[in-house]
């Protein structure tokens, strides 16, 4: 079919429809955005609590799994104040006590992890990359297990030799697994919190 020319000798060009702009986080109401942030944060904590007793392929070494709650505390504290990190560690420690045993309390060890991680970030001793996060998690697992073993020794329920022989075998396996799996949890959470921080800064 031949295209008929227009009266002025020029063919009519089809009108282009304006493209719809994708809605970004900056377009969300602040209240709804904060609600979404709390929902994602809460869901990530619940996921860590569910993963804690789970032993999936590749997530177990000598019967030990990654310390997911400790990884979460490090991921949270790396971009926040010392007190925010400490408080988050205490809260998650109390949640772990509810799932395991409250004596000695995990709130002490995880609170200490949040405190140290927050201090490291405040002094700018660390960078926010996967290698640094894995290294921090590795060291924090050793610190947390050493403190927990010390608390068990002070309690006097078991022999000192048994406690430290057990933790020497378990701590290294937990530190290795936790540091290897740390980026899996850290990357999506940190990406979300950084995006939210950019939106709030505008």
Image (cartoon, helix red, strand yellow):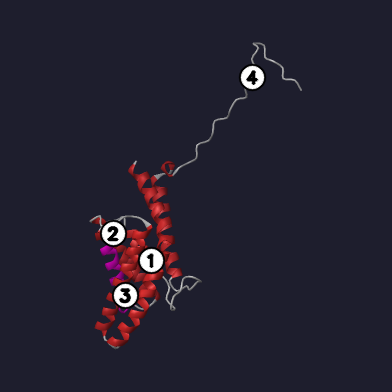
The residue beneath circle 1 is 179
Which comes before the other along the chain, label 4 or label 3? 4
Q: Can you identify the residue that label 3 sits on?
A: 145
Q: Judge by depth and name the residue closer to the eye, 15 or 182.
A: 182
Image point 31% across, 75% down: which residue?
145
Q: Nearer the viewer, mark 4 or mark 1?
A: 1
Q: Quadrant of the C terminus?
A: top left
**Dot placed on the residue nearer the N-terminal end, 2 or 1:** 2
Helix, strand or loop at mark 4: loop
Say which element carries label 1: helix
- Whole-number angstrom distance, CA of label 3 to CA of label 2: 22 Å
How many C-alpha atoms fall within 10 Å of the one at disc 1: few (<14), some, or many (≥20)? many
The local crowd at label 4, few if under 14, some if 14 to 19, many if 20 or more residues have their Cα within 10 Å, is few
State how far apart marks 4 and 1 are (Cα): 64 Å
The residue labelled by disc 2 is: 84
Q: Position of residue 25 (x, y in %)?
A: 43, 44
Residue beneath label 4, please? 12
Q: The magenta stretch spans which residues?
A: 102-117
Q: Is residue 141 above or below residue 62?
A: above
64 within the magenta span: no
* Magenta stretch contains residue 104: yes
- The Cα atoms of the two marked residues, 1 and 3, are separated by 14 Å
């Amino acid at each position: 079919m031949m295209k008929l020319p227009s009266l002025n000798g020029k063919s009519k060009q089809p009108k282009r429809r304006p493209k719809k702009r994708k809605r970004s986080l900056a377009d969300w109401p602040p209240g709804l955005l904060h609600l979404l942030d709390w929902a994602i944060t809460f869901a990530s904590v619940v996921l860590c609590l569910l993963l804690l007793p789970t032993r999936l392929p590749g997530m177990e070494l000598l019967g030990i799994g990654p310390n997911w709650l400790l990884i979460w505390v490090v991921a949270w504290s790396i971009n926040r104040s010392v007190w925010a990190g400490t408080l988050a560690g205490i809260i998650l420690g109390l949640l772990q006590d509810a799932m395991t045993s409250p004596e000695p309390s995990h709130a002490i060890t995880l609170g200490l992890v949040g405190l140290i991680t927050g201090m490291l970030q405040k002094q700018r001793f660390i960078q926010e990359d996967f290698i640094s996060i894995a290294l921090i998690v590795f060291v924090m697992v050793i610190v947390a297990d050493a403190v927990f073993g010390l608390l068990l020794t002070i309690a006097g329920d078991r022999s000192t030799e048994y406690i430290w022989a057990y933790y020497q075998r378990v701590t290294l396996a937990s530190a290795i697994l936790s540091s290897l799996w740390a980026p899996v949890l850290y990357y999506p959470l940190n990406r979300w919190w950084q995006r939210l921080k950019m939106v709030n800064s505008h």
